[in-house]
Amino acid sequence: MKSPSSRLCSLLPTLLVLAVSVGAAACDRGTSGGGGSSEAPHPSRGTGRHIREIEASARPSGEPAQTYGVAREHALTPIEAELLSQAEAAFGGSLTHDPSLSAMVRDLAVTSPSRFDMPPTLLDALMAWHGVADPQPAVIVVELAGREHGCDREPLPDCAGAVAAIIEEVSRTLETQPQARWRVGVGVAAVDGGSKTRMMVGVVERGIELAPIPVTVAAGGEVRVDGRLLGARRAPRIERVDPRGHWARLPAVVGSDGSIQSDVPCDGGDGIYQVELLADGRLGPEVVANLRVFCGVERPSEVVFVYERLGPKVTAADVVRGNFDLLNEARAARGLPALAWDDRAAAVAAAHSADMAQNGFVGHVSPTSGDATARFEHAGIVGVVVRENVARGYGPKGVHESLMNSPGHRANLLAEDVSHVGIGVVFGEPESSAADAPRPVFLTQNFYAKPGADAPEKPGPALVEGVDALRAEAGVGALSWDAGLTKLAQQRADASVGVGPAVDDQDFREAIASLGFSSLEQHQVSGGRFDMLLTLELWRELPAGAKVGVGISRAKEQFVLVILVGG
C-alpha cells in the first residue's frame, strides 16, 4: 500500500480572545526539525529584500459561471466520489456536497504551484470562475508519488492510506463546529507531469443564503445583493473595494431576521470590484460571502497570481516587518488606528513560536507555558485585553491573507479594544528533502490593551460627554452635572490612588451641606480601560435632572471613578 508523501492542511490558524481558546485547531501535526532562535526582532530591522514574490498563471477549466448562487453540473471521478462518500460517513452533522465547490477544488489541485502554495488570490479567482460566493474554504491536501497506482482516477487499494489520512483531517476540521452548515468539495488530479497525485478536500461553513448575483455587469451598472444570515449570526453589512483600491461600507436595508438588501454600484470605474458581506458570529466579525464582480470588463480566461518564496537570507525580522506592515495597512484601510509595536509582547510571541516549531504543534495552549494569559503574566505584562493569533505558513503576505480570511483571526486583527501588538517568528526545518521545499514559518501575534491606553486627554469631560450621548440614545432625560459635586468627587478619586490628601469625613459632610444637599449617594468604580467606565448601568438608571458629580484618577493599572449623586 502506498503511503502519502506528505499531509498538509490549509492555513487554519487558531486564536485566543480574552484567554478563551476558540477557532479551528491547526492541521499540521509535526515538523521535521527544530525551530531555531526565539529572538524577538523589532520590525525596523527587517526588509523585504530577500522575499520573492513569484508571478504565476493558471487557466480554470470549463465555462465560467455567469451567476453566483446557481448550482452547476460537475461530474465527480470515481476516486472523488469515494472521498465524498467517506467524508459524509465520517461526519454526523450537516454536510452538503457543492458541485461548484468541487469544480473549484479540482482546479485548485491542478493549478496550485505546489502542495505548499495555495495563494488566496488564486482561490478568489477560481471561486469567481465557478460561481462560489462562500468565504474561502479550508483545504486539506494529500499527495502520492506517481500516478501508476491509478489513484488519480479510481479508489484502488494503493489509495487507502491517502484516503484515510485526508478523511481524518477533514473530520477533525468539521468537528470544530459540529452544528455548522458545512459545504464540501473534492478534487483529485495528477500533477507535475504525472509525477504526483494530489488529493484535495475543501470545506466551508455557509453563513448566508443569497439570491443569485451576476458575476459580470455592464460599465456603470450595479448588482443587487439580497440575502439572509444563517445560524446565530447577526448585524449583516456589506463592504466593497473598487478597482482603485478604495474601501467603503455600503448602505443597506437590514431586517431584524438577519436579512440584508443592497445595490452595489460600479461607480469607481471599470474593473474588478471585491464585495464582502460580513456579520457578527460567535467569534466576532466574520466574512459570510466573498464576491468578485467584473464591471465593464471581460473576465480573463487566465488567472494571474503571486506566491511567496523566502530565500536563505530571509530573517525572522523580515517576516515580522512584512506581517506588521500588512496588519496596520488593513486597519488603516478600514479607518482603524494603527497598533503600536511592543517589544515585550513580541518576546512572548517569539518564545511561543519557537515552542510550536520545536514541539510540532500549532495552537494556543503549550504544555510548558500554558495559554497566552499565563505567558503574559509570567512576563510581567499587564493587559486589560489579551488576544492571540497563531499561524503556520510560508511568508508574511500569505499568512496575513489567510488570517484575514478566517473569521476569528480577522476579528483579532481588526479589534478596536487593543492598542499594542508584538509578533514573533521562528522558521521550521524544510518539510521534505525536495530542493524546492520551503521553510515553514511559525508566527504568533500577541495583541493587548495597556491599562489606560484609551484614556482621553481630559477624562472627566470626556466621561460626561459619553454619558450624555448614552442617555440621549436611550431616550432618557439629561443629568444635571454639578460643579461642586464634581470638585468633591475629584478630591475623593485623587485620595483613593494616593495623589491627593485624604478628605476627612466631617469636612466632607460639611462640604456637602454647604452645597445645599441633605443626602448623598457615593459610588466608586475601578477599571483598566476608560471605555469600561461608560458601561455602568447606573448611567441609564439615574433619573433625569439628577445632580451628579464625577472624579477620575488613574493608578498604575486602573482608573478609579468616584460618582456623587446629591439629593
Image: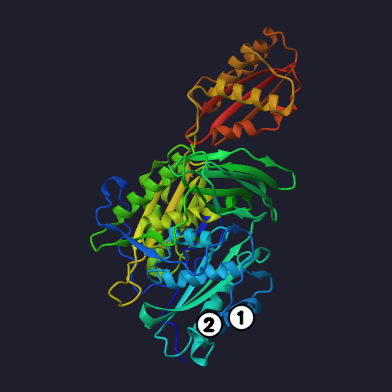
Q: Amino acid at mark 2?
A: Val
Report the coloring of the rendering.
rainbow
Q: Is residue 114 left or right of residue 96?
A: left
Counting other residues with Cα less than 10 Å from the Cα at mark 2, is it few (<14), some (14-19), or many (20 or more)?
Answer: many
In this rendering, the answer to whether 49 lies above or below 475 is: below
Counting other residues with Cα less than 10 Å from the Cα at mark 1, is it few (<14), some (14-19), or many (20 or more)?
Answer: some
Q: Which quarter of the rendered picture does the C terminus lie within?
A: top right
In this rendering, the answer to whether 390 lies above or below 357 is: above
The residues bearing labels 1 and 2 have C-alpha atoms spaced at a distance of 9 Å
Question: Circle 2 is placed at which residue position?
Answer: 163
Disc 1, SS: helix
Question: Circle 1 is placed at which residue position?
Answer: 86
Q: Hey, which quadrant is residue 289 in on the image?
A: bottom right
CB under 8 Å between discs 1 and 2:
yes
Name the N-terminal-most of marks 1 and 2. Answer: 1
The residue at the point 52 percent across, 66 percent down is: 63
The residue at the point 35 percent across, 46 percent down is: 343
Name the disc covering residue 426, or none: none
Tell me where residue 357 appears, x and y as whole percent.
38, 66
Q: Hey, which quadrant is residue 433 in on the image?
A: bottom left
Q: Amino acid at mark 1?
A: Gln
Tell me where residue 542 appears, x and y as whole percent.
74, 24
Tell me where residue 300 appears, x and y as whole percent.
44, 58
Q: Nearer the viewer, residue 250 or 90?
A: 250
Tell me where residue 311 appears, x and y as whole percent.
26, 62
Q: Is residue 516 left or right of residue 526?
A: right
Residue 36 seen anywhere in this rendered image of the structure: yes
Disc 2, SS: helix
